[in-house]
Amino acid sequence: MSKKEVVLTQEGLKKMEEELEYLKSVKRREIAARIKQAIDFGDISENSEYDEAKNEQAFVEGRIALLEEKLRNVKLIDEVDISTDVVGIGSKIKLKDLDTNEVFEYTIVGSAEADPMKNKISNESPVGSALLGKKKGSVVEIAVPVGTIRYEILDIMK
């Protein structure tokens, strides 16, 4: 079974490694201490603190396993490989909504790094995938759940 490649920028890789380190070095210790304290209370069969700590431990261990798996399959996007001629992963693009004339910027990133609140959209999203390979000045029509949006690519940056 082939593993899915995880496309990350240098910034995304750093954030993922920092989260993994935090979970392994800090969070695991905190949960272990909570479990030990709950066991010290006595009968664990009816101990809600114990159950909560064990549930959190299971979640954290699952997250650690997921992050380790993603890090094993990373394809790092090097900034020198990012083109300003066509939109690709790692490109920062300035778009104009042709219906509202609103101008905004997105950075195209891999799905593991996507964060719409920080204007980082996935290369696999409808908008991200429609923009890939397009040039400055292109008009792109994208079918989204609320209809069709039309963007003009004003600029492509690193």
Image: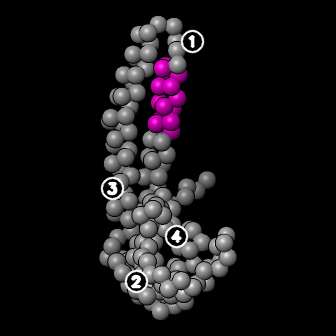
Which residue, as the protein is rendered here, is positioned at the far top? 42
Q: Nearer the viewer, mark 2 or mark 3?
A: 2
Mark 3 neighbour density, 10 Å: few (under 14) some (14–19) many (20 or more): few
- The answer to whether 32 is drawn above or below residue 132 in the figure is above
- Which mark sits nearer the N-terminus, 2 or 3? 3
Mark 4 neighbour density, 10 Å: few (under 14) some (14–19) many (20 or more): many
| Res. 91 in view | no
- Amino acid beneath label 1: Ser
Which residue, as the protein is rendered here, is positioned at the far front? 100
- Which mark sits nearer the N-terminus, 4 or 2? 4
Colour mode of the rendering: one colour
Element on which disc 1 rests: helix
- Which mark sits nearer the N-terminus, 1 or 3? 3
Q: Does the magenta stretch include residue 115?
A: no
- The residue identified by callout 3 is 14
Give the CA distance from mark 4 to mark 2.
15 Å
| Res. 100 in view | yes
- The answer to whether 154 is drawn above or below residue 41 in the figure is below
- Which mark sits nearer the N-terminus, 4 or 1? 1
- Amino acid beneath label 4: Asn
- The answer to whether 40 is drawn above or below residue 133 in the figure is above
- The residue identified by callout 1 is 45
| Numbered circle sitting on residue 156 | 2
The residue positioned 36% from the left and 28% from the top of the image is 30
The range drawn in magenta is 49-62
